Structures are given as structure tokens and as C-alpha cells.
Amino acid sequence: VCVLFLSFITGLWISLLLISAVGALYGMYTPLISRIENDHVHISDRATQLSIYMMVSDVFSVIPNVMAGRIAEISLPLTFRICSGMLLISTLTFLIGFRKE
């Protein structure tokens, strides 16, 4: 939601507040994902499996980051709207996948 609001806001202080909120929320997201990954690794070589998770995540994040950079050169608000849509899709995918377990 904060990212979507950033696409419409032009004020400095509100923008800084929203960016800070995104950073804070990411700080809560990271340990949660780490916990889920750790709970779902059932093999004896946990470190290798977790490293593979991180490498795959890094590889798949390159393409959206490059695309966002290119789109930002055209329009920053458009970039925030597209990123908001991608976040919504990934959240729904996560929730659907989590519900099946």
C-alpha cells in the first residue's frame, strides 16, 4: 500500500514517511521469510538448501530490478504502480500457496 501511495504523493515529508514505512515493513518481512524457510527444510544439509534458496531468490530478483530501473527512467510513478501490482500478485500467490499446506 505504501508503494502505491508513493506513486501519487509528491510531498517530501509524506514520501519520507512512506519510504521509512516500507523499510520498517521489510525489516519485519525478512525474519518471517527466514523462519518459514527454516521450518520447511527437512534435509540433513540445511546450509546448502538455504544457500540454494538465497541464490534462486537473488537470480529471480535481478530481472524485476532491471525492469523497474528502465521503467523509472520513463516514469517513477508508473514504476511504483507496477511494483505495487507485482507485490499484490506475489502476496496473493504466497497466501494461496500457504493455505494449501
Image (cartoon, grey):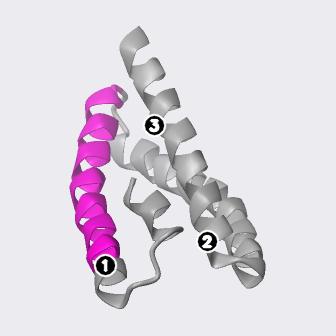
Determine the residue located farthest toward the bottom in the rendered image.
12
Residue found 38% across the figure and 21% down from its top: 98
Residue 32 versus residue 18 in the image, above or below? above
Q: Magenta region's main secondary structure?
A: helix
Residue range highlighted in magenta:
17-42
Residue found 67% across the figure and 61% down from its top: 64
Amino acid type for the residue under numbered disc 3: Thr
Q: Is residue 57 visible?
A: yes
Element class at badge 2: helix
Q: Is residue 83 magenta?
A: no
Q: Is residue 101 visible?
A: no
Which quadrant of the structure image shows residue 38? top left
Amino acid type for the residue under numbered disc 1: Ile
Amino acid type for the residue under numbered disc 2: Pro
Q: Is residue 27 magenta?
A: yes
Horizontal side of 19 relative to 65 (left or right) equals left
Which quadrant of the structure image shows residue 46? top left
Q: Crowding near pointer 1: few (<14 within 10 Å), some, many (20+)?
A: few
Between marks 3 and 1, how big is the CA–CA gap? Answer: 25 Å
Disc marking residue 77: 2
Residue 68 placed where, x, y %? 68, 69
Task: Name the residue beneath numbered marker 1.
Answer: 14
Q: Nearer the viewer, mark 3 or mark 1?
A: 1
Residue 38 versus residue 62 in the image, above or below? above
Mark 3 vs 1, N-terminal side: 1
Disc marking residue 91: 3
Q: Nearer the viewer, residue 51 or 68?
A: 68
Element class at badge 3: helix
Between marks 2 and 1, how big is the CA–CA gap? Answer: 15 Å
Residue 32 placed where, x, y %? 24, 45
